[in-house]
Amino acid sequence: MRWWWIVLSGQALRCRSVRQAPDGAEVVSACFFAYVLKLDMPGSNHHTIRASDFQRKAAGFYEDSGLPPPLLEAYWILALPEHFQEAVLKECPAMVVLAYLLGAESKLYTEPQVAAELYDVGMGLLQRFEIRTRSLIRESWPIDAALGRLRAAHESLQRLGSKSVPSTGLVDIVLAYCNEDLQWLQVALPRWVEGTARLYVYEKCGTPAVLGLLPAHIQVFHEQVIDGPPGGRKDECSAYLTHLSRAAMTRDVALYTLFLQADALNHVWPYYLHLVMRSIQLRSLDVSFLHLGQSRMVASTSECKRAIFKQVMGVDQQKMASGYCCAQFLVRQDLILAQGELWFRALKAMDEPLPAGCEHVRQGTGMHCLVFESIWHTMFGFSETFIPRAEDLTLPSFLRIPESDESDLPDGLRSTFYLERATGDDLSWLEKLLAKESDMSGARSLGYVGWDQRIATA
């Protein structure tokens, strides 16, 4: 149980004499000018939500300026006990109302019934104020923009729901396997997939994958893909490209295809992946491509990387590639089918000699796949520079999670407070899976253990 105390901090509190407010509506709509919601919890007394920050973030989101929605702050406000919400409502009503509207928009994609309830509560709270106060709140805060965004999202989801599922199914899952423990997948898949789905396991190290018993509605296909000469090491790329080449040839592709390494929970944000899978099952997801990695890659370039780019893409690289580590992503059917020839060319290139400009690179050590990791989004038709998810205006609000911490809330950037509550599901099973921690930092995240010794002896 969390214990809460709320402290109002503002310039007015530092005045020793009692000062008559010029107008109650003016003061309340402005949240007493410097309102701070302070969350004092055992062991911590520094977590705050400043009304001015919340207002700025919300306004930036609704203006499509690239700012993500302040969902973390909104969900903390929604989690306050009712009597604490009432206290905040007396001093900064717009903060509470806007939190309900932000929450309603996010829940449209995961719990539509809860979205309707949050909307009703938020509008009911606003209606409790007299007309002039309501008018000033709507002039000062992006309430009308929030309502417009809610209407647009609801209409978009209605159109999406009216579309039929392709005969090839809703989701395919492609797994690059090399002797990893797949217990996590056996636990997660039945919770992520309610209808028919296909799991393609590409066994790269000669050992059959042991999955155990999965529900009958999940079809499992096994295929060995061995990284032999002349190309040598190809990591997940040979698995992905084998699947993509076949899909382009047969055109047997589900609406969405999820590309994962077999130790995916070490690379993705697990709660985020759960959120994505939930929205797929509800038919509320409408994105063409989504990186699932939890970390941005450091952008880098070299003569060799540019040469491989041109060898595969057929054009000169215009910008330094940037995206997400570590080759875990979701792609819609149309993008896979639109790039058919590219998949064959990329697969073949990994067994060809490295192009001019790569003379210093060892043959057979996976240089092609290292380049592919930073340009998968480009191979699917996007610019070399892929913007952060939080700034991506093509993504629905519930997926635009910030990757730099501008809040003063518990756990900061690593907080899962919103993600754990976004679907309304019991995620205790996921917490148990995540209890097994792995060291996937630094060079280890790419499988380059001992890289410094190899350089020293080269």
Image: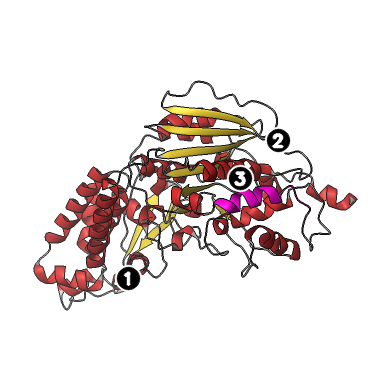
Circles 3 and 2: CB atoms closer than 8 Å: no
Q: Main secondary structure of the magenta part?
A: helix
Q: Is residue 254 above or below residue 342?
A: above
Q: Dot 1: few (<14), some (14–19), or many (≥20) neighbours within 10 Å? A: some
User: Is 37 in front, or is 202?
Assistant: 202
Q: Is residue 352 left or right of residue 94?
A: right
Kind of residue sitting beneath label 1: Ala
Residues at circles 1 and 3 in contact by the CB criterion of under 8 Å: no
- List x then y, in percent, for residue 163: 29, 47
Tell me the quarter of the image containing the N terminus: top left
- Sequence-wise, the earlier of marks 3 and 2 is 2
- Mark closer to the chain start, 1 or 3: 1
Q: Label 3 sits on what residue type?
A: Leu
Lower position in the chain sequence, tag 1 or tag 2: 1
Disc 2 marks which residue?
Answer: 226
Identified at 76% across, 45% down, the residue is 231
Circle 1 is placed at which residue position?
34
User: How many numbered discs, if any?
Assistant: 3
In the picture, measured across the screen, residue 1 lies left or right of residue 136, that is right
Q: Quadrant of residue 34?
A: bottom left
Q: CA distance from mark 1 to mark 3?
A: 55 Å
Which residue matches tag 3?
241
Q: CA distance from mark 1 to mark 2?
A: 63 Å
Q: Nearer the viewer, residue 74 or 268?
A: 268
| Model colouring | secondary structure
Density class for disc 2 (Cα within 10 Å; few <14, some 14-19, many ≥20) is: some
Dot 1 lies on which element? Answer: loop
Depth check: give the residue in front, 39 or 57. 57
Q: Secondary structure at mark 2?
A: loop
Q: Height in image: 122 above or below 1?
A: below
Q: Name the residue: 59% across, 43% down.
A: 240
